[in-house]
Amino acid sequence: MVFSSHIFIFYFLPLALILYFAAPRRFRNLLLVLVSYVFYGWANAAFVLVLLLSTVIDYLVGIALVAGCPSDIPGQLPQLEPGTPRTRGQRIMIIVSIAANLSLLGFFKYFNFFIDNVSAALQAMGLSDALVGGMIRVTLPLGISFYTFQSMSYTIDVYRGYARPLRNFIDFACFVSMFPQLVAGPIIRFKEVSEQLVNRVVTLPGFSRGIAFLTVGLAKKVLLANPCGKVADTVFGASSSTCIDAWYGAVAYAFQIYFDFSAYSDMAVGLGLMMGFVFAKNFDSPYSSKSITEFWRRWHISLSTWLKDYLYIPLGGNRISPLRTYFNLMAVMLIGGFWHGAAWNFIAWGAMHGTLLCAERLHGKQGFLSNLPDFMKITGTFVMVLITWVFFRADSLSSALEYLGRMFLGAGAGSADGIVTALIYRPYYLIAMIAGAWATWRGACSWEWTRVLTFRKTVAVIVLFVISLIVLTTQEYNPFIYFIF
């Protein structure tokens, strides 16, 4: 079930809110868990079992980590002291949590990738791949990359002494499964919402801001991401295109992935506010960045900070040596690329960003364009990000290289290029691309825009909501591209 669908907007969400506010406060977490399981299992009920397994494991590990420790607060589980040595049993427990979550993620997300590569290797050596090629294929549960990282961060924070484990299983299940951010983030840290899980208040300003967030996200998705995505699909799916069309298609995909993913984050934040939760900002006008380093401070903030806190810093960060720092940066970005997708083009995407980050650090933590005017820094950074997006969007590594050939060498031009050009420059798509450019570089960040709702903004929210619903009824193309991660 996607947020930008009639079944969610007109049926699921109203019913969920009615049940939520009708329920006594002590039962709201339970209700939210049940509603979230229905939401998650809408496409495939078996996915709920994977989610439940991850939840049960980390809940039990959290309790086991503090077993035998005295509690400083009656009625609550104890909290470990940060920086103190951990027992052998505690070290085993955190390994169990990490291994279990990574095993679930690895099996469901990378089993097919492993089989495909083994099969290709056998064929390259002239051997039969009948045994491997005939193996079953695994269906990827929606959002498994997000909720395994989120659940795993809970046990790591408990182990480090940064969080107090929950005694109530329903409260923990609510943290892992609440539907606003379940399948596409943002990745919520337990310490950010631990108090809200047991004590939160819904206010009229908060609820109103939540509606504004939801509406802005819906408008981004329906009015900008979908038409830009249609342009990108047309160009990337074509057997040939002109150089200009190839660049145009790459920009269209850059807009699609930004408005698609930031739209989901906006709607997730809005839905959370409507139920009393405050989630952290996940996007901060990333295409206005003046360097790749700054881009990763603004893009998918919940993932970049997760990788920093749970991978980069434990690897040593920048504290050991310059060479180790470059190794750590590259390792984190390679893992980040592989986290996004089980394909070589995603690994290449991560390697490119890792290389750019290392090069900027070698340049004295300054961007390559540090001596240029700001608009040239922003343009240059966007072009670098744009080139890497080709690897993210392409179906394979070879397809990405072929597309880059179109962009830089004009390679692959053919007789059908006129058809592609006619399809992607229709007035509707041109308007969407121009509006996307304005919203990207001139529009206000949704986090700031919704902070204070004036009368004019309220009218704008109503108008956007109505227009988005009207357009939604006419669109057949409505994917959420981050659901596959």
Image (cartoon, rainbow, N blue to C red):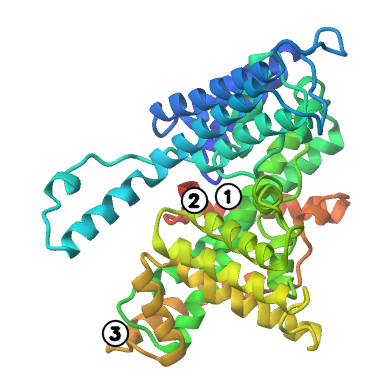
Q: Nearer the viewer, residue 382 or 350?
A: 350
- Above or below: residue 386 compared with residue 67: below
The residue beneath circle 2 is 473
User: How many angstroms separate mark 3 from mark 1 (CA)?
Assistant: 35 Å
- Above or below: residue 252 compared with residue 91: below
Question: Few, some or many C-alpha atoms within 10 Å of disc 3 (few <14, some 14-19, many ≥20)?
Answer: few
Q: In which quarter of the image is residue 179?
A: top right
- Above or below: residue 372 compared with residue 216: below
The residue sitting at the bottom extreme is 409
Task: Left or right? Give the position of 392 relative to 186.
Answer: left
Residue 154 can be seen, yes or no: yes
Mark 3 vs mark 1: in front: 3
The residue beneath circle 1 is 469
Mark 1: which amino acid?
Leu
Q: Which residue is drawn at 19% across and 65% down?
A: 124
**Residue 411 percent location from the top left of the image:** 36, 89
**Residue 211 percent location from the top left of the image:** 73, 42
The residue beneath circle 3 is 416
Task: Left or right? Give the position of 138 relative to 369.
Answer: left
Question: Few, some or many C-alpha atoms within 10 Å of disc 1 (few <14, some 14-19, many ≥20)?
Answer: some
Q: Judging from the image, what secondary structure is the residue with disc 1 in?
A: helix
Q: Which residue is drawn at 72% across and 33% down?
A: 157
Tags 3 and 2 touching, CB below 8 Å: no
- Above or below: residue 286 compared with residue 145: below
**Residue 256 percent location from the top left of the image:** 55, 64
Dot 3 or dot 1: first in sequence order is: 3
Q: Residue at x 77, y 28 (%)?
A: 163
Mark 2: which amino acid?
Thr
Question: Few, some or many C-alpha atoms within 10 Å of disc 2 (few <14, some 14-19, many ≥20)?
Answer: few
